[in-house]
Structure formats: C-alpha cells, structure tokens
Amino acid sequence: MRFITFGLLCLVSLTGCDGSGSSGEKKVPLDQVPPAVRATADKAVPGVQWEKAETETEKGQAIYELKGRDSSNRKVEVEVTPEGTLVEAETEIPLEEVPIVAREALKARLPNFKPDEVESVTKGIGPAGYEFEGRDERNKKIEVFVSADGTQVTIEEDDD
C-alpha cells in the first residue's frame, strides 16, 4: 500500500496537479494570444501595454492570463477564457483610491490588518470590488475581497 501511495504522489508531482483543480502555467507569446482573448483584455482595461501571457487550466477550464502595465505604470492582470469571456481583471492601486465604504468594511472586519498590496477587481461573474493582500495577526498571508459597496467581505488564507 505504501508503494502505491508513493507512486501516486510521484505521478501527481510529475503532472503538476496540486489537488486544487489547477494545472501549471504555460507561457504563450503575445502574438499567439487568440484575438477574442486580446480584445476582451483590451476592453476590460484600456490602454494597457501587455508584457506577457500564460495559459493555465482552472477546474477543467482553459484560462489565458495577460499581465502588463497601464498608462500610470500600475500592474494589471486579466484572466479570459479562450472564447473571450472575462473571468477577472485586477489593477494595482494605492489604498487611498479605495472608496471609503470599502475601506471601512475592511477595518470593521479586520481592525488591525495593514495590506501590502491593493487591487481594483472586476469580475466577469460576481461583484466588482477590491482585493487586499497582507498578513493577519498570526502572520499568516491572507487575501481579503471587499465588494465595492462594502456589503461583502471574504477572507482567504494563502498557502505559504
């Protein structure tokens, strides 16, 4: 039985599966990104200078991830299906640009949390809002999503 378990662990590590339903990223030259993907990315965040593209599989679905910088030199990431459906668009922003209602919702839920990174988030399905990344009081890396109106606050722990 130990040999079978060891064999399965080896197979999982070789295939790049981590049990999350996501497989490894694969680089794609920008000139090989499908036109529908590029058009959706350009529309989601106009004026971005795309620097690189990758594909990955999330829950059995192929996803293109484009990364670049906007006209203010802020980091941008966009996830799009091969058919051109927006999954998510994130733009790095300073905390001061987050509406007060969202900042107050974050402070009410996590009074001592100091984010290291803040992103404006647009989702293809679901609410738009803001993601805050940093460490909680136990020094565990977390990501907090707050909807634009402050009514939804969700916390995810990252695996370190």
Image (cartoon, grey):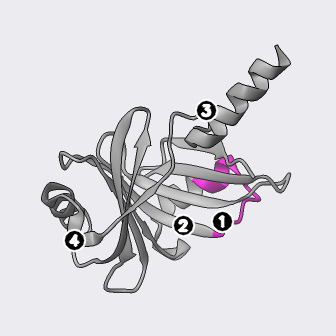
Per the image, is 110 magenta? yes
The residue that label 4 is drawn on is: 31
The quadrant holding residue 58 is: top left
Gap between marks 1 and 2 measured at Cα: 7 Å
Marked residue nearer the N-terminal end (3 or 4): 3
Q: Secondary structure at mark 3?
A: loop
**21 sits to left or right of 45:** right
Residue, x 55% and y 43% (percent of image)?
Answer: 153
Residue at which label 1 appears: 115
Q: Which residues are magenta?
A: 106-116
The residue pinned by badge 2 equals: 118
Q: Residue at x 20, y 63 (%)?
A: 38
Q: Are marks 1 and 2 in contact (CB under 8 Å)?
A: yes
Secondary structure beneath label 4: helix
Circles 3 and 1, Cβ within 8 Å, touching? The answer is no
Q: Residues within 10 Å of mark 4 (few under 14, many from 20)?
A: few
Q: In which quadrant of the rendered view does residue 40 lie?
A: bottom left
Tag shown at residue 105 = none
Q: Amino acid at mark 4?
A: Asp
Give the percent coordinates (x, y) of residue 9: 71, 31
Nearest to the observer: residue 89 or residue 131 = 89
Q: Is residue 30 left or right of residue 159?
A: left
Judged by depth in the image, the label closer to the viewer, 2 or 4, is: 4
Mark 2 in CB contact with mark 4 (< 8 angstroms): no
**Percent position (x, y) of residue 117?**
59, 69
Q: Nearer the viewer, mark 3 or mark 2?
A: 3
Gap in angstroms between the C-alphas marked 4 and 1: 35 Å
Query: Mark 3 or mark 1, which is nearer to you?
Result: 3
Marks 3/1: CA–CA distance? 28 Å
Q: Residues within 10 Å of mark 2 (few under 14, many from 20)?
A: many
SS for callout 2 = strand
Circle 3 residue: 19
